[in-house]
Amino acid sequence: MSDFFSDGWSLFVAGVTIAGLLFCIVLLLIAARHRVMASDNSTGHVWDEDLREMNNPLPRWWAILFVLTVVFAGIYLAMYPGLGSNKGSLNWSSKGQYEAEQKAAHEAIAKVYADFQGKTAEQLSQMPPAMAIGERLFANNCAGCHGSDGKGSKGFPNLTDGDWMYGGDHQTIIKTIAEGRNGVMPPMAAAVGGPEDVKNVANYVLSLSGSAHNAIAAQLGKSKFGACAACHGMDGKGNQALGAPNLTDKIWLHGWGEEAVINIINQGKTNMMPAHASRLSAEQINVLGAYVWGLSRGASATTAQAR
């Protein structure tokens, strides 16, 4: 049934297009006819006693341009898609042109990135040309969410602090950029218990990072935290394989405090980072990944020394 309607619309569009061209030709023929309606070569229509409508033929240059326009339209429709589903003799499409342009662009880009192939993040971070390109790629593709300095905002991770939900090595960052991430925490209120249990668990979560909390409520919520431990671990340090955040480091992506934690437990949270593999080439993602890796290098080194 869908094919029937598709073919029907295609024929309809083709018919209307051809009818429009034929109408233009007929209109030209009618307008070109010289029919004298009065002895003075006018149509017989007179306004204000001396203003007459003459019956002169169309100027030849105007008629020639009109004919050329119709001929051009016919040639165009024969070469390019315009008659319904007919693809034209050139088999052109906007999609095909876009893909060809993208292929040419990627081939040109590959030459620019040839010097960066096979390099580690550490090596790329020591190459000013690579980091200059990475900075521009970050500004054009990442800064809208993570900020021009990479420090993020509420709901958008800080890329400079050494805290990684999925891992901060070069290959993991590349995977994140290319494929995107879809982090989902389901509502956990039913698994935790009643409203008072949720409040107690929220205080226990706050206690894990040494944040301000109600110590008595936290102690009561410790046993209920087991419902959360499957993802965050019994120690609350998270699980990078699942993208479960570390609850012990005082880094709060979606807001801090008892009320914020209670809301997340009750309502859950979904966060998505779009995939960029369709927008950026593998060479670009490699350099961008090294630039992002470098944003937290100082923080990671500081954290490692502290441990």
Image (cartoon, grey):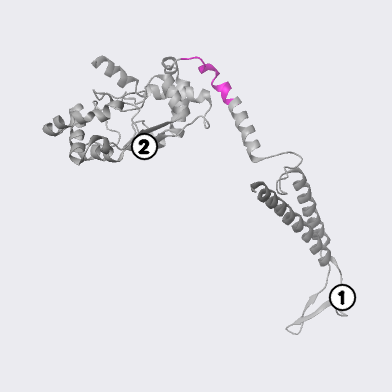
Q: Mark 1 belongs to which amino acid?
A: Val
* Image disc number at residue 36: 1
Identify the residue position indicated by label 2 in the image: 270
Judge the density around disc 2: few (<14), some (14-19), many (≥20) Cα neighbours within 10 Å. Answer: few
Judge the density around disc 1: few (<14), some (14-19), many (≥20) Cα neighbours within 10 Å. Answer: some
User: Where residue 52 appears, x then y in whole percent?
Assistant: 78, 79
User: Where residue 56 appears, x then y in whole percent?
Assistant: 83, 70
Q: Quadrant of residue 27?
A: bottom right
Q: Is residue 210 left or right of residue 186?
A: left
For the question of whether residue 246 can be seen, the reply is no
Q: Name the element at disc 1.
A: loop
Residue in front for this viewpoint, 163 or 269: 269
> Is residue 121 covered in magenta?
no
User: Where residue 123 appears, x then y in whole percent?
Assistant: 44, 14
- C-beta proximity under 8 Å, tags 1 and 2: no
User: Where residue 239 appears, x then y in whole percent?
Assistant: 32, 23
Residue in front for this viewpoint, 276 or 8: 8
Magenta highlight range? 108-119
Q: Mark 2 belongs to which amino acid?
A: Thr
The total number of labels drawn is 2
Q: Quadrant of residue 17?
A: bottom right
Q: Is residue 171 left or right of residue 192?
A: right
- Residue at the farthest left position: 216
- Residue occupying the point 14% across, 29% down: 219
